[in-house]
């Protein structure tokens, strides 16, 4: 990813951090004043999310560093690693939500929360949903997996707050069990989302690559004028940066300059058609 795109992704993460700090302050204050355990727990959850967002932010910042002697391919994989760490934090939060809800089931509280805390939770859920939509849209535009992970975290938090709304209303009218059921479901949703991010980041870190995309790359290469056959092709992802390595056959009577021109043409076509800039072509005579 170009530094300009990484800077834009950075703004999206800062947006998440600002929202989390603002919403956690509102939830904690309203939760203590309005006697709502669910809203207080949601507020502490948002404080934890600040840590996850900071992890993603650090990963994006490291990914902007240029290649050096020890990192000849650059530092773009730091973005993927930050997504992996964010998935661990998300899973721990989701697991804790499940555990806390089970504890609440066996040790229910007799106190009723003030009804206005449900409206506070609803407001926070709506705000976080719009933060999710913004970061999701930006992550797709920039093809930033770290920002996409942050967006999934935003969505999970919107669900947690909506669960708090239902739980608070249920507790207010005496249906404490409703709070437990909703909280448990929300916890499992967060864990499932975290597992999806974990699975995708591990796939990238182990150099997995989508076969359909690889076929698209091969199609562009083999239809480049001068290429007679594609002998071998590989691709991998670092952050949102795709690297392609290919061995192609050209006519044996071509000069070195002509063969080099074909190689340059392949690189330019992949850049123009598929936005791939890291291309290594090895030319062999046919």
Image: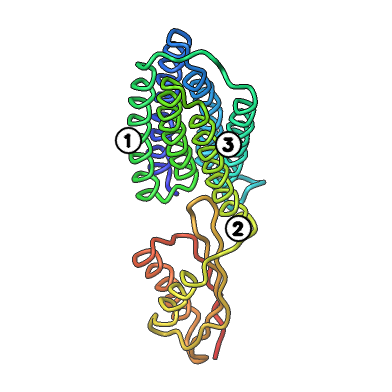
Find residue 130 and name its label.
1
Mark toward the start of the polypeptide (1 vs 3):
3
Q: Position of residue 160 (x, y in %)?
A: 47, 32
The residue nearer to you, when weighing 275 against 248, is 275
Find disc 3 in the rendering and name its residue. 94
207, above or below 177, in the image: below
Label 3 close to label 2 by CB (< 8 Å):
no
Q: CA distance from mark 1 to mark 3?
A: 21 Å
Residue at 34% of width from left, 46% of height from top?
137
State whether residue 41 is above or below residue 150. above
Asked if one can make out residue 107 in the rendered structure from this viewpoint, the answer is yes
User: What label does residue 49 carry, if any?
Assistant: none
Q: Nearer the viewer, mark 3 or mark 2?
A: 3
Residue 226 found in image quarter: bottom left
Q: Quadrant of residue 62?
A: top right
Foreground mark, 1 or 3? 3
Disc 3 packing (10 Å; few <14; some 14–19; many ≥20): many
Badge 2 or badge 1: first in the primary sequence: 1
Q: Dot 2 corresponds to which residue?
A: 203
Q: Residue furthest front?
A: 174
What is the x, y in percent for residue 286? Answer: 54, 91
Q: CA distance from mark 3 to mark 2?
A: 22 Å
């Amino acid at each position: 990813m170009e530094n300009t795109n990484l800077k834009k992704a950075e703004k999206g993460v800062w947006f998440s951090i600002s929202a989390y700090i603002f919403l956690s302050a509102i939830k904690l204050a309203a939760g203590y004043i309005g006697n709502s355990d669910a809203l207080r727990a949601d507020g502490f959850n948002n404080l934890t999310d600040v840590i996850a967002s900071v992890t993603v932010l650090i990963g994006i910042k490291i990914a902007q560093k240029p290649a050096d002697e020890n990192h000849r391919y650059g530092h773009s994989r730091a973005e993927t690693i930050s997504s992996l760490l964010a998935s661990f934090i998300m899973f721990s939060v989701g697991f804790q939500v499940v555990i806390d809800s089970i504890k609440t089931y066996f040790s229910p509280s007799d106190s009723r929360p003030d009804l206005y805390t449900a409206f506070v939770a609803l407001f926070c859920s709506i705000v976080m949903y719009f933060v999710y939509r913004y970061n999701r849209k930006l992550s797709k535009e920039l093809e930033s997996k770290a920002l996409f992970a942050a967006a999934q975290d935003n969505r999970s938090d919107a669900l947690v707050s909506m669960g708090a709304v239902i739980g608070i209303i249920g507790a207010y009218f005496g249906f404490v069990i409703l709070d437990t059921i909703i909280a448990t479901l929300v916890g499992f949703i967060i864990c499932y989302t975290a597992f999806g991010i974990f699975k995708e980041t591990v796939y990238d870190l182990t150099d997995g690559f989508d076969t359909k995309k690889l076929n698209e790359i091969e199609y562009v290469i083999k239809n480049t004028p001068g290429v007679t056959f594609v002998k071998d092709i590989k691709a991998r992802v670092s952050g949102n940066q795709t690297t392609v390595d290919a061995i192609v056959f050209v006519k044996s009577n071509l000069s070195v300059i002509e063969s080099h021109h074909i190689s340059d043409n392949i690189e330019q076509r992949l850049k123009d058609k598929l936005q791939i800039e890291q291309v290594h072509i090895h030319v062999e005579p046919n």
